[in-house]
Image: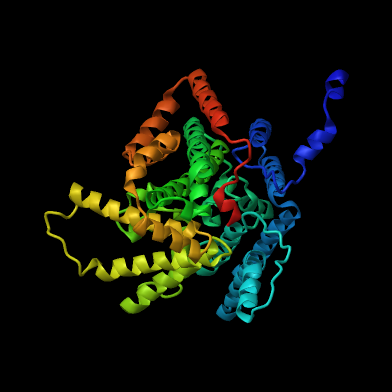
């Protein structure tokens, strides 16, 4: 035993567990896999002791967050405590004016944190550009996942105000809900009204939940590492960094490649987060539902980042008036909601432009929905669905080009290349030069367009397999992921938003 401990380099272990801004603890790292195995073994051992299980999970979640944001974990704990106290205070008040003040205080504090940590440098830089002065960015550390846990905080207080939720009386339960590590860094936006009843119930994970969770985790790893990381590092980033070095057809393929990359990266994280939660006995709602199958802008936002789009609908669009004050106000509310939703994604004006673009698409779709008629025989037909899906995919892909472009100038260069320097004749050379990229992009889109029942068939098959075969499948997936993984850690895209 002594010789075993003598061979352990405790200094290296300490360095591995300490905060390193270049090595966050992500789902796609070997360190997380090792730590999660130890975590779940202890978690299962104490599963019948509710308080111990909560304390242990909170401690692991805070360590997980510490590895990404260092001392910012105290901000997260501060949000937990302020929400708990404000929620209890709000529920005890009878005066509507006082209740509204509590809600306003919570919104101001959360949006104030977002404004400072995420947008302060952007605002200062914009002001400096307007007055023509130099600008040196302030050294502000962005707490990972701040966009997600501030939205969860706001929805908790607003739901209490609306009478949809009673405040949580157990501080441990609420701390668990906010710090729970699977959705902590990049979603989904899990609302207290959905997770708190599950925390109180303290139900164990069933065999069905475990098998479904494992399938989601494996699917997420494949999406993230084998598709998203590979096409981004070997093709997409090169095109967006230097669009004028590539022909129009390569720029266009870069747009389609990035759209697939973003979907696989973000939905891959959501899949893993939902899957990890299932292993621990908690069920989250679906966050993506084949968004590239959307037939119109409204349909797209019912399928893409569902937890965010429904949050924006319930806590921004409806309070703005929704569709209750005439057509013009409806269109304006759509645009305002999407502009703010776009800005939520990151501290750059291109995100705001992307949000405005989608707001206009929603407004135009609603304006023409009752005016633009098609022959009755076409409605719901397969050819009509194909046309709708194709047109919507092209609109979405161009929108993501706005999202990814570093500036309006860069976007303009890409558009210029597409429309004035297309050169479709180089496609055979492109396929010959990037065969694996072509295979990855085609495979990604083909898998996306498979019938919805395919996912259920795969899940059912895995769940019915003997444990030995399940372990073998998992080992094969992990082997493929390790082989495909690049030497440098590629963070999830939404961790920087």
* Left-right relation of 223 to 61: left
Could one spot residue 94 in this view of the protein? no
* Left-right relation of 246 to 23: left
Image coordinates of residue 309 in percent, x first then y, are 44, 59
For the residue pair 354 and 76, the one nearer the viewer reads as 354
Residue at point 44%, 57% (across, down): 401
* Left-right relation of 58 to 184: right
Quarter containing the N terminus: top right
The image quadrant that residue 459 belongs to is top left
For the residue pair 438 and 27, the one nearer the viewer reads as 438
Image coordinates of residue 88 in percent, x first then y, are 64, 65
Could one spot residue 455 in this view of the protein? yes
The image quadrant that residue 157 belongs to is bottom right
Image coordinates of residue 439 in percent, x first then y, are 40, 35
The image quadrant that residue 146 belongs to is bottom right
Image coordinates of residue 17 in percent, x first then y, are 76, 40
Quarter containing the C terminus: bottom right
Tally of numbered tags? 0
Residue at point 60%, 70% (across, down): 107
Model colouring: rainbow
Residue at point 17%, 55% (across, down): 379
For the residue pair 9 and 315, the one nearer the viewer reads as 9
For the residue pair 21 and 143, the one nearer the viewer reads as 21
Question: Is residue 310 placed above or below 92 in the rendered structure?
Answer: above
């Amino acid at each position: 035993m002594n010789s075993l401990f003598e061979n352990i380099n405790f200094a290296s272990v300490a360095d591995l567990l300490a905060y390193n801004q270049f090595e966050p603890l992500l789902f796609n790292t070997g360190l997380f896999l090792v730590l999660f195995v130890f975590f779940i073994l202890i978690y299962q051992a104490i599963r019948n002791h509710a308080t111990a299980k909560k304390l242990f999970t909170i401690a692991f979640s805070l360590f997980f967050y510490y590895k990404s944001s260092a001392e910012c974990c105290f901000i997260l704990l501060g949000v937990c405590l302020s929400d708990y106290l404000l929620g209890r205070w709000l529920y005890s008040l009878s005066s509507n004016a006082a209740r509204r003040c509590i809600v306003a205080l919570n919104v101001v504090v959360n949006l104030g944190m977002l404004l400072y940590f995420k947008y302060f440098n952007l605002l200062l830089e914009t002001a400096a550009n307007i007055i023509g002065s130099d600008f040196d960015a302030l050294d502000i550390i962005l707490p990972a996942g701040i966009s997600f846990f501030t939205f969860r905080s706001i929805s908790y207080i607003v739901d209490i105000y609306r009478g949809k939720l009673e405040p949580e009386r157990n501080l441990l339960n609420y701390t668990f809900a906010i710090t729970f590590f699977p959705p902590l860094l990049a979603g989904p936006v899990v609302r207290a009204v959905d997770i708190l009843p599950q925390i109180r119930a303290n139900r164990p994970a069933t065999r069905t939940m475990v098998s479904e969770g494992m399938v989601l985790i494996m699917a997420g790893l494949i999406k993230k590492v084998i598709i998203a990381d590979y096409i981004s590092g070997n093709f997409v980033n090169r095109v967006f960094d230097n669009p004028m070095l590539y022909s129009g057809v390569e720029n266009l393929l870069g747009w389609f490649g990035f759209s697939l990359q973003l979907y696989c990266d973000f939905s891959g994280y959501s899949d893993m987060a939902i899957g990890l939660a299932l292993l621990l006995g908690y069920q989250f709602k679906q966050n993506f539902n084949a968004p590239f199958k959307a037939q119109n802008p409204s349909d797209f936002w019912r399928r893409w980042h569902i937890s965010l789009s429904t949050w924006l609908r319930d806590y921004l669009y409806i309070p703005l008036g929704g569709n209750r004050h005439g057509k013009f106000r409806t269109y304006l509310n759509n645009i305002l909601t999407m502009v703010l939703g776009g800005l939520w994604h990151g501290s750059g004006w291109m995100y705001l432009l992307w949000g405005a673009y989608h707001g206009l698409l929603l407004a135009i779709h609603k304006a023409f929905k009752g005016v633009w008629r098609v022959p009755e025989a076409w409605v719901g037909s397969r050819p009509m669905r194909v046309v709708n899906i194709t047109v919507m995919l092209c609109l979405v892909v161009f929108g993501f080009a706005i999202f990814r472009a570093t500036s309006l100038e860069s976007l303009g260069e890409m558009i210029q290349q597409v429309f004035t320097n297309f050169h479709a004749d180089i496609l055979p050379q492109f396929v010959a030069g990037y065969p694996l990229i072509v295979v990855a992009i085609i495979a990604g889109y083909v898998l996306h367009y498979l019938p919805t029942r395919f996912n259920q068939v795969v899940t059912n098959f895995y769940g019915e397999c003997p444990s030995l075969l399940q372990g073998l499948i998992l080992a094969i997936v992990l082997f493929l992921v390790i082989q495909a993984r690049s030497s440098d850690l590629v963070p999830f895209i939404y961790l920087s938003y």
